[in-house]
Amino acid sequence: MLKFLGLATLFLLLAILAAIALAMVLIRLAGSEASRWHVDPALAASGREGGWTLRPEGGDAVGPRARAAPEALLRMLDEIALEEPRTRRLAGSPGEGRITYVTRSLLFGFPDYTTVAAVPHPDGGHTVLLDGRLRFGKSDLGVNRARAKRWMERLRTRLAREGTLAEPGPDGAR
C-alpha cells in the first residue's frame, strides 16, 4: 500500500510539473497580434490593475513636456525603449506617430505591451501618451508602472541634455 501511495504521489508531482512546463511554453509561444495591441493610448482607462497610463490629464501620471517635434520625441523614446531588456517593437514607428512594444518577463516570458504616442501638450510643446498593460493575469506587481517611470526619467534626462525639456517636473506621479 505504501509503495502504491509513493508511486501515486510521484505521478501527481510529475503531472503538476508537466502542466507548469506546458503553461510556460504556451506563454512564451503566445503570438502578439498588432491589431489587438497597437491601439491609441489616449483611449486607455487609467487606474486599472496591471496597467499604467501617462496623459496630460486623466492618466495615472504625466509625461515630460518637450519643445521637440512629435516624431523627434518618439524617436528618442524608441531608442530608450529598445534599450530595455527583452523589449522589441511590435508595431508602428516614430514617423507613424504611435509605437507599440512587447516586453517579456525574464523567468516566465509573460508579455507586457506598451503603446506610446506624442501629442500637443495643453501648455505648449508636446508630451508622451503611454499605455502599459499586461496580457495574462490581473496584477503585474507594478512592473508596467516601474517601466514607464524608468523610460520617462531617461527621456527627461535626454531632453534636458538636448535643451528641449520644457518642464523638468518630478517623476510625473499624480
Image (tube, grey):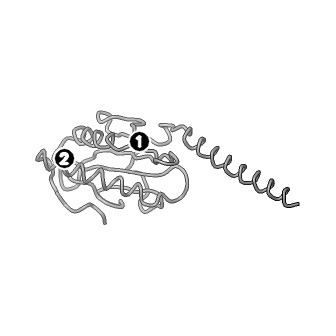
- Locate residue 84, reporting x and y percent: 34, 44
- Compute the Cα span from label 2 to label 1: 22 Å
- Locate residue 163, reporting x and y percent: 11, 47
Q: Which type of secondary structure does the marked residue at label 1 adopt? A: loop
Please report the residue visible at 39 percent of the width from the left and 41 percent of the height from the top.
Answer: 87
**Disc 1 designates what residue?**
86
Residue 38 located left or right of residue 152: right
Residue 132 located left or right of residue 21: left
Residue 4 or 157: which is nearer the viewer?
Answer: 4
| Comes first in the chain, label 2 or label 1 | 1
Residue placed furthest toward the left: 163
Residue 134 or 10: which is nearer the viewer?
Answer: 10
Q: Tell me if mark 1 has few (under 14), some (14-19) or many (20+) residues whose alpha carbon lies within 10 angstroms of its own.
A: few
**Disc 2 designates what residue?**
158
Q: Which type of secondary structure does the marked residue at label 2 adopt? A: helix
Q: In this figure, what is the number of numbered marks?
A: 2
Residue 94 located left or right of residue 10: left
| Discs 2/1, front | 1
- Locate residue 1, reporting x and y percent: 88, 60
Which amino acid type is marked by label 1? Arg
Residue 158 or 48: which is nearer the viewer?
Answer: 158
- Locate residue 147, reporting x and y percent: 36, 53
Which amino acid type is marked by label 2? Arg
Q: Tell me if mark 2 has few (under 14), some (14-19) or many (20+) residues whose alpha carbon lies within 10 angstroms of its own.
A: some
